[in-house]
Amino acid sequence: MSVRARRNFLAGLVFAAGLILIVGGIMMPIPLRFQVMSVVLGILLYQTALLRMYDRFLPNERKYLALRAETNRLLTLVRDMNQAALTAQSMGMDRTSYVEPILRQMHATVDRLPLVAAEVGTEEVRQVH
């Protein structure tokens, strides 16, 4: 069974258990405190399934970790470039001098993408000289 199939099965199981506890707590002729506990536990399970809070307990299904790291680095650099441009603009300075170093880093990151593509299971990012 694949990791994705296990995640989907777990989501369905937790969701169904939550609904069963909610409906059962309301419909069963049991003492009120047990009904309340059943409904509260059911709501917690239901919310756990909806918010996918169980994900942190399951293994990561990503295989191409080096490519993911480079992609995350590129996105961080895009944010940094925007922040540098906004800072320069607010100070009335030339944006080029602030943005140019970040742009060089972005080009280096894009150049590394083909090198790390299809590398399985490594978070190590190679440096290109």
Image: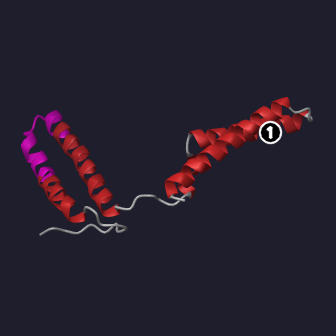
The count of marks equals 1
* Prevalent SS, magenta region: helix
Which segment is the magenta one? 87-103
Would you say 41 lies left or right of 110 here? right
Quarter of the figure with the C terminus: bottom left
Q: Residue at x 14, y 39 (%)?
A: 88
Query: Does residue 56 show up magenta in the picture?
Result: no
**How did the renderer colour the structure?**
secondary structure
Of residues 93 and 47, the one drawn nearer to the viewer in this rendering: 47
Crowding around mark 1 (Cα neighbors within 10 Å: few <14, some 14 to 19, many 20+) is many
Q: Where in the figure is residue 52, as x and y percent of width and height? A: 55, 45
Where does label 1 land, which residue? 38
Q: Residue at x 9, y 38 (%)?
A: 93
Describe the element under mark 1 as helix, strand or loop: helix
Quarter of the figure with the N terminus: bottom right
Q: Is residue 121 above or below residue 51?
A: below
Q: For residue 67, what is the image quadrant?
A: bottom left
Q: For residue 125, what is the image quadrant?
A: bottom left
Q: Residue at x 51, y 57 (%)?
A: 3
Of residues 56 and 61, the one drawn nearer to the viewer in this rendering: 61
The amino acid pointed to by label 1 is Ser
Of residues 128 and 113, the one drawn nearer to the viewer in this rendering: 113
Q: Where in the figure is residue 35, as x and y percent of width and height? A: 84, 35
Would you say 71 lies left or right of 44 here? left
Q: Where in the figure is residue 124, as x and y percent of width and height? A: 31, 69
Q: Residue furthest top?
A: 27
Q: Where in the figure is residue 71, as x and y percent of width and height? A: 27, 53
Query: Does residue 90 show up magenta in the picture?
Result: yes
Would you say 26 lies left or right of 30 here? left
